[in-house]
Amino acid sequence: MRSLRLWRRPVYRLARPFIWVFGRVVNGVSSDVRGVVVNEDGHVLLVEHTYVRGWHLPGGGVERGESPEDALARELVEEAGVMVAAPPRLVAGSVGGDAPDGYKGLLYRIDHWSACEPTSRGEILARGWFPPDALPEAATHWTRRRIARAFGLVPPSKA
């Protein structure tokens, strides 16, 4: 079943610019939120999508009329099966600069949460918990930087 969903990766690479424009126009997506979910062992939750390579932090776009915190809570349930139990802590925000593709987004740390059934069907290939200092080889550069920032290992100007 895993290989059946991997066909999405090359298609997504070609369609990505159109998907971004469509999301911004139709849904009013203007920024992105990512969550560093930390368990009792200090491990972080990463997801592997069916349409793009690598391990990433769960999260996604903030839709029209939605607060960043509401978008984060929605995305965490959809992608990760995580229900936020206390207000997430804002760790960093990025606008342009050295961020990829003029990225605009917010990074939150979630220490208080409970498990629930993920609602996304077909978007997530795998979920996994990893020590912040021993991330999988396929964790992206930006995922590594965001996790380092959430654990205070990178100055704010470098996250």
Image: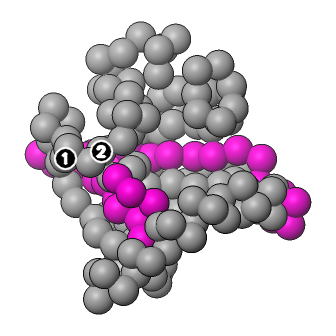
Residue at horizontal 80%, vertical 57%? 21
Is residue 48 one of those drawn in magenta?
yes
What amino acid is labelled 1 in the image? Answer: Pro
Image-based side of 63 in relation to 35, left or right: right
Image-based side of 121 in relation to 33, left or right: left
- How far from the left and from the top, in percent, is residue 146? 41, 32
- How far from the left and from the top, in percent, is residue 93? 59, 28
Residue 118 in the image: above or below residue 114 = below
Residue 114 in the image: above or below residue 140 = below
> What stretch of residues is rendered in magenta?
25-54
Residue at horizontal 40%, vertical 81%? 5
Does residue 10 appear in this view? yes
Residue at horizontal 32%, vertical 26%? 148
The one nearer the camera, 15 or 72, is 15
Residue wearing tag 1: 136
Is residue 47 one of those drawn in magenta?
yes
The one nearer the camera, 107 or 121, is 121
Counting every numbered tag in the picture gives 2
What amino acid is labelled 2 in the image? Answer: Ala
- How far from the left and from the top, in percent, is residue 104? 67, 35
Which residue reaches farthest right?
25
Q: Secondary structure at mark 1?
A: loop
- How far from the left and from the top, in percent, is residue 89? 47, 35
Q: Quadrant of the N terminus?
A: bottom left
Residue wearing tag 2: 139
Residue 43 in the image: above or below residue 11 = above
Q: Secondary structure at mark 2?
A: loop
Image-based side of 14 in relation to 114, left or right: right
- Asked if the residue at tag 1 contacts the one at tag 2, i.e. Cβ–Cβ closer than 8 Å, the answer is yes
Q: CA distance from mark 2 to mark 1?
A: 5 Å
